[in-house]
Amino acid sequence: MKILIIGGAGMVGRKLAERLATDGRLGDKEISALTLVDVVAPAKPAAAKFAVKLLTGDLSVVGEAAKLVADRPDVIFNLAAIVSGEAEQDFDKGYRINLDGGRYLLEAARAAGHKPRLVFTSSIAVFGAPFPDAIGDEFVHAPLTSYGTQKAICELLLSDYTRKGFVDGVGIRLPTICVRPGKPNKAASGFFSNIMREPLAGLEAVLPVSESVRHWHASPRAAVGFLLHAATIDGAKLGPRRNLSMPGVSVTVGEQIAALGKVAGDKVVARIRREPDPFIEQIVAGWPRNFDPKRAVSLGFRADKSFEDIIRVHIEDELGGKIA
Amino acid sequence: MKILIIGGAGMVGRKLAERLATDGRLGDKEISALTLVDVVAPAKPAAAKFAVKLLTGDLSVVGEAAKLVADRPDVIFNLAAIVSGEAEQDFDKGYRINLDGGRYLLEAARAAGHKPRLVFTSSIAVFGAPFPDAIGDEFVHAPLTSYGTQKAICELLLSDYTRKGFVDGVGIRLPTICVRPGKPNKAASGFFSNIMREPLAGLEAVLPVSESVRHWHASPRAAVGFLLHAATIDGAKLGPRRNLSMPGVSVTVGEQIAALGKVAGDKVVARIRREPDPFIEQIVAGWPRNFDPKRAVSLGFRADKSFEDIIRVHIEDELGGKIA
């Protein structure tokens, strides 16, 4: 089985590649070759016993997609995107990368003619306020950002190209990934991870919103699990609606902090500094808080069991089991 | 006020142009100029006392959209589309005309920089079965045709371009237009009109489905009313969700026939010949049957009052008041 990961240098792409390398197989099929491509050079997953090709390239450049699918990968993961903030600041770039890039890939896969499984990472940003208490599988996609618009459009294209038999698409709307490893970043959503990751590493973190803010989370490990399941699930079970809200953990920031206390103790919690930021509070107010992802659950997608588990995954996968 | 109608040679475009010519104004503004453009030559509305420009052109050709908005029309109606059946048969043409054409228009309007009101005719084809009993304003867009996909994508673009302040968009999802004037056509939906129009003209018509089939209708006159209201409504009242399911009349085919009997008598009804067609029955089974268009109604969009009224509109507007 040949696998292509577009966006292979990103956090989720890297973890997915590492998991594929460790497993050596996807579902019941042995992996023979893996291609990673991104706008910056991807890294080779250390454990890989199969052939790994590392490419740099931009999916939104005409002709790139055709090159990527020329060797007819059986499974394509399209994780490539510019993030919400950048898509909002640079309208044309957002549409070029997140919409045109996705469309070029669908066209290239259609031209290749072998109907590959195409796993597309969509986002809960396809939903826009006002929301019901828990967003169900039949709630309207009315995004309030260009990023969410681009993801919603790619979902529609994925379903239509699948319905026409051009690809075998599965789109998954990832919850916010938490705890995101790496440095604190300026994304408005960054604090959800910052207030966990930094204190666990012995550093102070700023909480800019009130503890009553509720949000929808999945660990990086759960996200990789979603991708693997999306790559191997029987497409016939999905029917024509090929895009699914993934399960997650809905917690308030207060519940996040309580979970941190249980797992790591009061000393770690004390490293969170409250510094309310009305600007961030206002942005976050427009974000989904909770989902009722019945279809994904019935199709076998599995979330983390609790926010404590999300923290434990971070300690195991990123901190070698040690808390500072 | 300068008005541009793209798709001005189509049935709805023609009726809209005639209405604008008769009124001489749109809302409280006098019309100074009207441009009609279509892939075939549009006709000049006879009653027009303002300047009328008639153009042929294809919106999906790069550069065409920019020419059309060069004189900065205050209101643009985009009614241009290839229909559902053709978009399904010719995938590339459908995306070129219905998606790329719409996107070029948005880009041209953005470049013009004067934030015109852009009224876009979407379709109930953005919805796909399974449906609730009545489709509400928050029901997911999961189309089951390429046409519906293209319309759903243009809706998303219209909202995003409006949110960014590039245009002032309003999208309206028209019910099936009934009674559609002209000759019987081969559209799967054609029979809804055929079984009214042909008997009223003294001709036989074929009913290919059972009388229990329920569908969602608006007269051509109501459709023009929706367009005029969409062109003049205060955009601020819509908020960020700029696309609306229009109100309509939900009736079964049996109720359509009963209404025809009431308005035109048994002799006319007797001209309907039952000739069940399982293929058409199956297509129609996937179509929306009923809506609960609360937002549009609260915003002042008004449907025909009954199916009898829909028949009367046809007799008045198309038959000079006379039944054969």
Image (spheres, coloured by chain):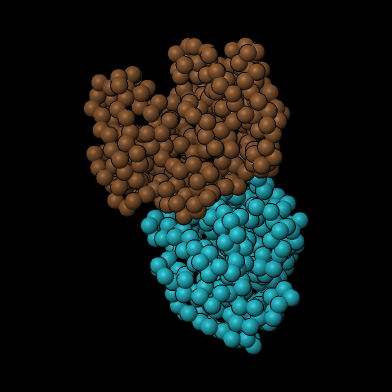
Chain colours: A brown, B cyan
Q: Residue furthest front?
A: A203
Residue at the limit of the structure toward the bottom, as seen here: B49
Q: Tell me if residue B57 comes above or below residue A236 in the rendering.
A: below
Q: From the viewer's perspective, is A174 left or right of A232?
A: right
Residue at point 53% right, 14% down? A324
How many dots with numbers? 0
Decide: is B131 above or below A250. Answer: below
Q: Nearer the viewer, residue A239 or B189?
A: A239
Residue for point 46% across, 36% down: A121
Q: Position of residue A154 (x, y in %)?
A: 46, 46
Left or right: where does residue B190 sit relative to residue A113?
right
Specify the quadrant that holds the N terminus of chain B: bottom right
Res B58 seen here: no
Q: Quadrant of the C terminus of chain B?
A: bottom right
User: Which image quarter: residue A258?
Assistant: top right
Does A54 sit above or below residue A196?
below
Nearer the observer, A196 or A246: A196
Q: Position of residue A183 (x, y in %)?
A: 49, 29
Q: Quadrant of residue A167?
A: top left
Q: Nearer the viewer, residue B274 or B170?
A: B170
- The correct choice, above or below, for A304 with respect to A209 in the image is above
**Whether residue B50 can be seen here:** yes
For image coordinates 30% across by 47% down, the residue present is A64
Q: Quadrant of residue A196?
A: top right
Left or right, A273 with respect to A35, comes to right
- Residue for point 27% across, 34% down: A54
Residue A127 place in picture, x, y as percent: 60, 42
Residue A232 screen position, x and y as percent:
39, 27
Which sits in the foreground, A215 or B96? A215
